[in-house]
Amino acid sequence: MTESDTTTAPELRAQVVDTMVALLTRMLRPEAPVTVGTQLMDELGLSSSLALELLLEVEDELEIQIDVEDLDEDRMTTVGDLADYITQHSTPR
Amino acid sequence: MRDTVRIWILSARVGPDELARYDAVLTADERSRAAALGPATARDRFTVAHGALRLLVGAALGVAPERLAWRRGRHGKPTLTEPRGGPQTSLSYSDDLVAVAVGGDRPVGVDLQHVTPGRDPVALAARFFAAGEARHVASGPDVAGRADRFARLWARKEAVVKAAGDRLWPHLALPVHRGDVVACGDPPGVHRVTDVATPAGYRVAVALAGDAPYDTASFHGLDGPSGPAPRPTG
């Protein structure tokens, strides 16, 4: 059994949030700290191509595969919203 | 007669006077959206993009730019509602440039992508694009060539999705490399996508609903094809 198999949803969500905060801080170097409530497009100005890079890096970092079929801008308003989506739509690699 | 789409490619880095003139035609809602953006470059880019859209469409219709109104559809596709019967429009920005497309009756989507030459996109394409397009990206001559191929495909996919008013994420594998006529949307409809000549380091694509060929006319700066340029007046 891999580590991912035993990860609970709240644990995975916390890992996703931590990873996204670190990645967004490195990618965008925002003036204000990135938090779970930070708005990805409306505050950080995250583009779709950077969002794609973010998803790939989260996948690699956490060794998961994210199903993007149901992803929508409405589900990625904040860091926490996207973390919720990823938690609900990912499988261990 | 063939349709024509006009595409303006504008610098998002403008001086304070020009920025103030773009800002002057924004609505209160647009101004607060600009203000919410953290990075100053993102704020200015938003102001230029939305200000330019208003100035260009206002000039085309003879309507005061600040009186124009758009309604956002299910997946965010904007439709001009004030005045009704105006042209279809689309907007895109990336890094230091803004693209504004003004069409006719056919739904339009424009997308502009900054090519990031230092970042190899092979893994991104392998993960999210269809196998043939991933191979096309991977077989670019060097990192810059691969980044350029990736940006071109990405701009074409986004342009089609925007014209279709659909969501981007289920369409990452949309085939756009070989053919210009692409099915997308709900219900699915065909769209014709075209590469637009762009300053070095960027890729721009435009798409119109329907498979009928059309002409593109692109402009750098606010100068239009006829009449006085709709420069912001202050």
Image (cartoon, coloured by chain):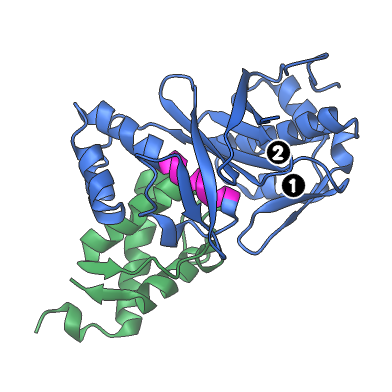
Chain colours: A green, B blue
Q: For residue B143, which numbered disc appears in the image?
A: none
Decide if residue A22 is in sight here. yes
**Image position, residue B116 (x, y; %):** 35, 32
**Image position, residue A28 (x, y; %):** 42, 44
Residue type indicated by callout 2: His
Q: Residue at x 34, y 65 (%)?
A: A18
Viewer-closest of B127 and B139 = B139
Residue B16 is inside the magenta segment:
no
- Asked whether the beta carbons under mark 1 and mark 2 sit within 8 Å of each other, the answer is yes
Q: Residue furthest front?
A: B1
Report helix, strand or loop for mark 2. helix
In the image, is residue B49 above or below residue B222?
below
**Image position, residue A42 (x, y; %):** 59, 53
Query: Mark 2, chain letter?
Result: B
Q: Quadrant of the C terminus of chain A?
A: bottom left
Query: Mark 1, chain letter?
Result: B
Q: Quadrant of the N terminus of chain A?
A: bottom left
Left or right of B24: which side holds B137?
left
Q: Residue at x 49, y 22 (%)?
A: B197
**Circle nearer the N terminus (1, 2):** 1
What's the CA distance linking mark 1 and mark 2?
Answer: 8 Å
Residue tagged by mark 2? B50
Q: Residue at x 35, y 82 (%)?
A: A10
Report helix, strand or loop for mark 1. helix
Numbered range of the magenta stretch: B154-163
Q: Residue at x 33, y 83 (%)?
A: A9
Q: Quadrant of residue B21?
A: top right
Q: Quadrant of residue B187?
A: bottom right
In the image, is residue A10 above or below residue A28?
below
| Foreground disc of the pair 1, 2 | 2
Residue tagged by mark 1? B30
Residue B162 is inside the magenta segment:
yes
